[in-house]
């Protein structure tokens, strides 16, 4: 973990992962700073984590850190993915309260005031943003996201609220617990739900991206969904077991039927049906092995105990700290 010298612990930390967000950073910095001052006065920090961007994201973040002592620019050694970039920000932040938000301005920093009000009124440890609407997204993205969250709620061992992202305000004790969790395949909104304590929603309308394109194409969305399910549910393994039992039962009945027909002198004919049965059983076996392999692969990678991320540089008030994990 990076050691950072500071005069005083800030009241609020804003943690913002960024990937190819050069078109958003200036506007994000301005709006996030205004929102932070509204709730914490001058006692805040804005941590921008560059997740291996290919554009000028870190150069702009470093320039903001040189101009504004509230900004901390963090550069990861490569692209580790949104969730691990967020994890890096959580290990560096020092605030009593932590606001997690993306730098693309789809989630409004101005909602921080309402989140603080709800947190104090409800005596909550987490206040999370729950999306009423999502502007600027395709029908496929909206439909798949809606289906994903509802399926996940049924599969997961903990209650993960629907229509929520990582946009949330949390207390320091929740952040410390998250930092103590060592797993590599992180689904942060699920981990926060797992922690427990009192968690309260605040409804809002999600805006379209301020600039640029999404960093979550279909391939990453599918991988993210798989990580979410395998991190919080073993139901797929149970489904694989039940599927195997059902297939074995059907196969046993088919064998009995073949034997009875043979003893009665009937010819069991039909190459097409035979091949169909073989392909069906083979396909089910491969499907079951795939599910088991997905969990086994994650277990194998977890045992390596590699660092979750590597920090190349941390820039704060014109001073850089070199590579840390």
Image (cartoon, grey):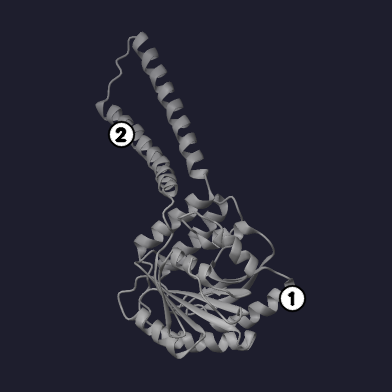
Instruction: Say how many tags the image has.
Output: 2
Dividing the picture into quadrants, the one containing residue 281 is: top left
In depth, the one of 48 and 163 nearer the eye is 48
Determine which residue is flagged by label 2: 279
Bin the neighbour count of mark 1 within 10 Å (Cα to Cα): few under 14, some 14-19, many 20 and up.
few
Q: Residue at x 66, y 59 (%)?
A: 196
Determine whether 179 is above or below 259 in the image.
below
- Residue 137 at x, y percent in the picture: 42, 73
Q: CA distance from mark 1 to mark 2?
A: 60 Å
Q: Secondary structure at mark 2?
A: helix
1 or 2: tag closer to the N-terminus = 1
Q: Quadrant of the C terminus?
A: bottom left
Residue at the (31%, 30%) spot, across then down: 278
Tell me the residue at 42%/22% (across/down).
Answer: 252
- The label on residue 121 is 1
In the image, is 223 to the left or to the right of 153?
left
Q: Nearer the viewer, residue 91 or 119?
A: 91
Residue 259, label in figure: none
Horizontal and vertical percent position of residue 87: 49, 65
Secondary structure beneath label 1: helix
């Amino acid at each position: 973990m990076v050691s950072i010298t500071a005069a005083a612990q800030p009241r609020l930390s804003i943690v913002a992962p960024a990937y190819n967000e050069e078109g958003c950073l200036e506007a994000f910095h301005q709006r996030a700073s205004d929102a932070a001052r509204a709730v914490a006065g001058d006692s805040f920090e804005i941590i921008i984590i560059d997740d291996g961007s290919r554009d000028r994201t870190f150069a702009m973040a470093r320039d903001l850190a040189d101009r504004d002592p509230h900004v901390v620019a963090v550069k990861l050694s490569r692209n580790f993915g949104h969730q691990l970039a967020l994890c890096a920000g959580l290990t560096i932040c020092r605030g009593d309260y932590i606001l997690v938000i993306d730098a693309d301005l789809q989630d409004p920093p101005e909602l921080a005031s309402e989140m603080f009000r709800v947190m104090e009124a409800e005596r909550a440890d987490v206040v999370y943003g729950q999306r009423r609407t999502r502007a600027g997204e395709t029908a496929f993205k909206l439909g798949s996201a809606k289906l994903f969250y509802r399926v996940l709620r049924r599969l997961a061992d903990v209650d993960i609220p629907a229509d929520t992202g990582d946009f949330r305000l949390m207390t320091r004790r929740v952040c410390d617990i998250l930092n103590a969790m060592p797993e590599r395949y992180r689904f942060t909104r699920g981990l926060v739900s797992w922690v427990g304590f009192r968690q309260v929603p605040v409804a809002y309308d999600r805006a379209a991206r301020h600039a640029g394109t999404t960093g979550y194409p279909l391939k990453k969305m599918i991988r993210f969904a798989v990580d979410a399910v395998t991190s919080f549910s073993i139901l797929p393994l149970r489904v694989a077991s039940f599927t195997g039992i059902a297939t074995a039962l059907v196969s046993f009945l088919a064998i009995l039927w073949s034997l009875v027909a043979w003893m009665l002198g009937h010819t069991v004919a039909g190459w097409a049906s035979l091949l169909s049965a073989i392909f069906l059983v083979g396909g089910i076996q491969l499907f079951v092995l795939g599910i088991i392999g997905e969990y086994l692969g994650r277990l194998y990678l977890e045992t390596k105990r590699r660092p979750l991320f590597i920090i190349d540089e941390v820039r704060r008030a014109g001073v850089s700290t070199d590579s840390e994990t």
